[in-house]
Amino acid sequence: MIRGITPKLATLVAALAAAPLAQAQFSTVSVYGTLNLDVEAVRGTLPDGSNPTTFRVSSNSSNVGLRGSEALGGGLSAFFQVEYAVAPDEGGANQPLRDSFVGLQGDWGSLQLGYFLAPYDDVSPLFGSVPTYLTSILSTSTLWSQGAQSKQNGGFDTRLPNSIRYDAPIYNGFTGSVQLSLGESENTNLRTDHTLSLAGFYVNGPLEVGLGYERNVEIRGPSLTDQALSFAGTWNFGTLRIGGVYERLRYETLSGDLTRNFWGVSATAALGPSGTFYVFYGHAGDGGGSAADGTRVGSLARGPDSSADQWMVSYTYRLSKRLMVYSGYNYIGNAANATYNFYVNRYPVAVGANPSGFVLGTAHSF
């Protein structure tokens, strides 16, 4: 048994890995994963008014999975992936499903069905904390997309169930993706809840730009539609990469629309052959729109003093192609009525508190 994997998952790994030998279903099947752990010193004013420094060990999107492909002839191939989260910090007792799908690929692009992140999420690597895998408390999805929130609570950077996704091939530097997630709610006869996610990208030498749009229909409740629009870009100077992003969120509420603007800038610099330095600043504006003051969706509230700032810096060093160590600091400056928190491994702070944390971690891919 692979250490850290439950007997049920180990049985699945063994069964699927053996399937090509027994039935010749897939020409290639591989086991892969990432173990990403860190030691954190986090703090922020708690609901009881105290402000302790808490030391903890956290797992950051650690995972294990299987992927395979089969050539079908005529330029067509089939592919699949089954991926589970693992929790090596706590013994791996809980293993929810991550990006898992089956699909077909050809010269016309690819089509897949399953449960996975949407095209809107593909915008984040243009400006986000790629050196630390866009995860941990160092993630730049803290403010962007309300990434710490579930889909039912107004978040946009989440995996979508019951999904159909098409990815177009690259043509003269352009490519795009579209995904439809059918909510299939059991609480309504019409089952009209769904998510539509779109993204388009253009690459030309050192320039890369992306535009993403996502629309959630009746996910938070009947007759409520949420929308997110992001535009991001990056210019690669070689040893220095500069990125930027603008985002507009709009939520329908019972008292009117709730809106928010966000912008951020980042810089990624190569320090020698193995080191990478990353710095980010993002600002989420006050909640606006026609909704009543105090109306809240996720961490966003309507009215003054609902803005937030994020400062983040990190350094990563690769010991090998698959192993890296990293350190960093993240600070979220909430205004008096804001409640933004870490993207993962959240800290239970009070409204208006300023969560922050130092990180020292390592990640190993296999």
Image (tube, rainbow, N blue to C red):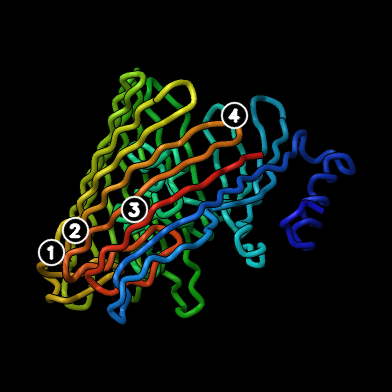
Instruction: Count neighbours of disc 4 (C-alpha within 10 A) and say few if under 14, some if 14 to 19, many if 20 or more.
Output: few
Instruction: Count neighbours of disc 1 (C-alpha within 10 A) and say few if under 14, some if 14 to 19, many if 20 or more.
Output: many
Q: CA distance from mark 2 to mark 3?
A: 15 Å
- The residue that mark 3 highlights is 214
Image check: 324 left or right of 216? right
Residue 6 shows in this picture: yes
Query: Which dot, 3 or 1, sits closer to the camera?
Result: 1
- The residue that mark 4 highlights is 321
Q: CA distance from mark 2 to mark 4?
A: 40 Å
Q: Earlier in the sequence, mark 2 or mark 3?
A: 3
- Residue type, numbered disc 1: Gly
Q: Are discs 2 and 1 less than 8 Å apart at CB?
A: yes
Q: Position of residue 76 (x, y in %)?
A: 65, 30
Q: CA distance from mark 2 to mark 1?
A: 6 Å
Residue drawn at x 29%, y 71% is: 45
- The residue that mark 2 highlights is 260
Image check: 204 left or right of 263? right
- Residue type, numbered disc 2: Arg
- The residue that mark 1 highlights is 288
Q: Answer above or below: position of 311 versus 71.
A: below
- Residue type, numbered disc 3: Glu
- Residue type, numbered disc 4: Lys
Q: Earlier in the sequence, mark 2 or mark 1?
A: 2
Disc 2 element:
strand
Q: Which quarter of the picture shows residue 68?
A: top right
Residue 178 shows in this picture: no
Image check: 134 left or right of 5? left
Q: Are discs 2 and 4 less than 8 Å apart at CB?
A: no
In this view, the residue in front, 230 or 329, is 329
